[in-house]
């Protein structure tokens, strides 16, 4: 008799967590691996801030039938190996429902590798072309950020039609740089551009002076600086020092808000580039105003950066999809995400069916002269509206 | 006419760019070399002192100073930190194995970087050259940034001063004697501990000066010392650990090597200096001007 009781009791205990889970009473955990330490620490910090806005907003609106969301931030140190380990921990030990994050092409592919194997939804919030391709992609892979093809395409079409067709490239020698150059070259075909120099520099360079006399002598109409973060800041500063702006327009495929603040007003003056988001969009887009106001209220009046806004978009889409699906079950949330037609912070967006790339607008901004602490650093000079035509086709990416 | 497919003007300008680049290397390497030559301390915190120099500049500017105040104030501030580090940390490790101070200074780098992140944030900060040094000048073969010419000038002046101090003053004589044979110098009644303290302060002060001079070239960030440390070591190894002349020759040589490879084989521009180092180590392990056996 007694033995049977014990057995029953044990069975009850074992069954308890399963029942809890089935009722959906646990918190919804969103794993968030980003490079808090390393060269992109400032951008990563802002991604976390914006993700917190999405979490609070979700919880304030009642969550998923009373289930609250929680953000589990992890430092991937901008290192693919580290990112894979942290993601595995998030999935295996912390039992996260979703993973959102990544701030480098290589790191997001490492994260995706893990989530893909474990069948966990991953919404990537940094630029990559490879993540859309069949070999890396999976049903649980989503890409909220722009990709280099879209960004370089939009910026290129703007630059070639307005600034000139003799172009030169100064490119960081890794995936991001190569993908950007490829994007510009493809967009340039229709314009008949002439490439006068295509210089690759090692990533993490602190001095570009050795590349500049040659570029000075070539006098291209446009110099594309296909590098990122601190590389871009230093490259812009030094090309300006060498007086290249006299004959050449400086264009960065991706001109980040944080880069501009760190790089300073004078060196960046007149530099043109692409971005997924600029806070001044609030003048014309109501959802941007709503997001900025929430961000300001939660973070002491500061405005969100472009990469920060992606943190918001990335987290909000998975949570909204879970809400529509009424569950955190992967398959159903995937379906709900695929069906989303959303406008959360920058105008209309949706995930393309074949590769889950978020189809969205690309902004072209120009850096203006400002006082030191001014946060209004760009003019939006052009907006390329969401259009699947500007993405590589599904068949080109290897999707059936 | 072209040489290797480039107009001669461009090649000359390129070589000149390399010399300007070398000037920053020299300033860095000389401080590192000084400390090693006199104290046999491999100062892994040299890059961190360089970074502290840039932030000391930011601090002085915020406190109402201008660029010229920084040029004088920064080496003093950073040198003072160096004195503190020698007096209370490095001094305890003299006479031990060469690895011990190396590990200590390696750890100090992390401490300094974290402190700066706490104080000024992770975000890089802009740092502009004074108005009067901005813009470019025509040097006959092309346009060159005025500020880079200024850096060459400051480096030359500092090196001259340093040379006069070490070779032409009584105190310099004591420093040189102390490096040769500290025991004899001590027997002669000289406080060798004070000499070493001063040398460490001087070396770190030079690193600080290099940092504030580099700030208008690349901006200011907590991690700016990392790349620079590797470059400074390459230059000291090529020139010979502990040799001032070696540091100068090697700094300029490395600068020109980097510039020329950037023109001919851009992807290789970062590897070029390490290749140069490897070749020198194979042919002359003690470096171009180094004394053999200093590391043993």
Image: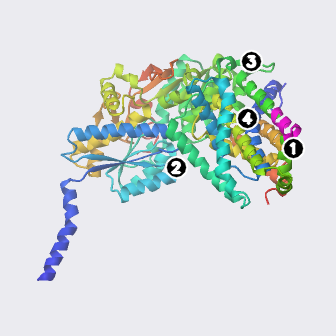
Figure check: A80 above or below A40: below
Percent across and percent down for residue B276 are 78, 46
Of circles 2 and 1, the one toward us is 1
Q: Which label lies toward us, 2 or 4?
A: 4
| 10 Å crowding of disc 4: few (<14), some (14-19), many (20+) | many
Residue B160 falls left or right of residue A320: right
Name the quadrant containing residue A240.
Answer: top right
**Residue span colored magenta:** B160-170
Mark 1: secondary structure:
helix
Whether tag 1 and tag 4 are in contact, CB under 8 A, the answer is no
Compute the Cα span from label 3 to label 2: 42 Å
Q: Are marks 1 and 4 on the same chain?
A: yes
Residue B161 in magenta stretch = yes
Q: Quadrant of the N terminus of chain A?
A: bottom left
- The Cα atoms of the two marked residues, 2 and 1, are separated by 50 Å
Pointer 2 chain: A
- Name the mark nearer the viewer: 3 or 4: 4
Point out the frontmost of discs 1 and 4.
Answer: 1
Residue B173's tag is: 1
For marks 3 and 4, give the CA distance: 20 Å
Q: Kindly indicate the quadrant of the structure image that contains residue B222.
A: top right
In the rendered image, residue A395, in percent from the top left (x then y), is placed at: 43, 41
The residue where tag 4 is placed is B24
**In the image, residue A206 lies at what x, y percent?**
64, 36
């Amino acid at each position: 008799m007694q033995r049977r009781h014990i057995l029953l009791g044990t069975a009850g205990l074992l069954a308890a967590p399963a029942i809890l889970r089935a009722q959906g009473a646990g918190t919804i955990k969103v794993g968030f691996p980003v490079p808090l330490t390393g060269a992109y620490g400032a951008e990563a910090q802002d991604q976390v801030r914006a993700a917190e806005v999405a979490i609070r907003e979700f919880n304030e609106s009642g969550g998923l039938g009373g289930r609250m969301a929680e953000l589990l931030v992890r430092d991937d140190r901008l290192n693919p190996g580290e990112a894979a380990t942290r993601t595995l921990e998030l999935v295996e030990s912390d039992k996260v429902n979703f993973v959102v994050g990544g701030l480098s092409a290589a790191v997001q592919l490492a994260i995706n590798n893990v989530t893909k194997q474990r069948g966990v939804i991953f919404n990537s919030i940094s630029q990559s072309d490879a993540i859309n391709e069949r070999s890396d992609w999976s049903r649980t892979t989503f890409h909220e950020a722009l990709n280099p093809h879209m960004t370089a395409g939009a910026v290129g079409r703007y630059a070639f039609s307005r600034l000139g067709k003799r172009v030169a490239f100064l490119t960081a020698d890794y995936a991001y740089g190569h993908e950007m150059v490829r994007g510009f070259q493809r967009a340039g075909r229709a314009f008949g551009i002439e490439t006068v120099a295509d210089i690759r520099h090692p990533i993490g360079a602190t001095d570009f002076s050795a590349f500049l006399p040659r570029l000075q002598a070539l006098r291209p109409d446009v110099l594309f600086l296909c590098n990122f973060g601190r590389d871009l800041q230093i490259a812009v500063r030094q090309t300006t020092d060498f007086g290249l702006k006299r004959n050449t327009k400086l264009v960065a495929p991706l001109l980040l808000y944080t880069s501009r603040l760190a790089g300073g007003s004078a060196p960046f003056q007149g530099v043109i580039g692409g971005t997924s988001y600029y806070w001044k969009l609030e003048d014309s887009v109501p959802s941007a105003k709503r997001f900025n106001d929430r961000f300001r209220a939660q973070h002491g009046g500061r405005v969100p950066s472009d990469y920060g806004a992606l943190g918001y978009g990335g987290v909000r889409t998975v949570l909204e999809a879970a809400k529509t699906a009424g569950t955190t079950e992967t398959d159903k949330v995937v379906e709900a995400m695929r069906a989303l037609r959303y406008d959360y912070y920058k105008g209309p967006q949706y995930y393309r069916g074949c590769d889950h790339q978020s189809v969205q607008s690309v902004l072209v901004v120009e850096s203006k002269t400002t006082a030191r602490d001014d946060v209004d650093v760009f003019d939006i000079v052009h907006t390329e509206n969401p259009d699947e035509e500007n993405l590589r086709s599904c068949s080109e990416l290897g999707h059936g | 006419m072209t040489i290797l497919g480039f107009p001669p003007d461009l090649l000359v300008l390129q070589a000149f760019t390399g010399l300007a680049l070398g000037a920053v290397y020299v300033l860095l390497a000389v401080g590192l070399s000084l400390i090693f030559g006199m104290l046999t301390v491999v100062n892994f915190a040299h890059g961190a002192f360089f970074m502290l120099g840039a932030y000391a500049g930011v601090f002085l500017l915020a406190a109402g100073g201008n660029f010229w105040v920084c040029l004088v104030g920064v080496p003093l501030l950073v040198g003072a930190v160096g004195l503190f580090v020698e007096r209370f940390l490095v001094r305890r490790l003299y006479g031990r194995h060469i690895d011990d101070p190396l590990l200590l200074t390696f750890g100090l780098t992390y401490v300094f970087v974290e402190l700066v992140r706490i104080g000024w944030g992770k975000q890089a900060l802009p740092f502009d050259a004074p108005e009067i040094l901005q813009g470019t000048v025509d040097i006959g073969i092309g346009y060159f940034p005025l500020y880079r010419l200024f850096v060459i000038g400051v480096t030359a002046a500092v090196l001259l001063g340093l040379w006069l101090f070490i070779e032409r003053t009584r105190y310099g004589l004591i420093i040189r004697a102390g490096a040769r044979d500290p025991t004899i110098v001590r027997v002669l009644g000289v406080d060798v501990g004070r000499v070493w303290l001063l040398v460490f302060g001087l070396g770190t002060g030079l690193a600080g000066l290099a940092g504030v001079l580099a700030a208008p070239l690349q901006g200011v960030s907590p991690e700016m010392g990392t790349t620079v440390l590797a470059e400074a070591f390459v230059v000291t190894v090529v020139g010979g650990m502990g040799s001032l002349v070696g540091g100068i020759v090697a700094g300029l040589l490395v600068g020109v090597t980097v510039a020329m490879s950037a023109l001919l084989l851009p992807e290789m521009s970062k590897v070029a200096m390490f290749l140069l180092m490897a070749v020198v180590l194979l042919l002359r392990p003690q470096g171009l001007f180094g004394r053999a056996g200093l590391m043993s």
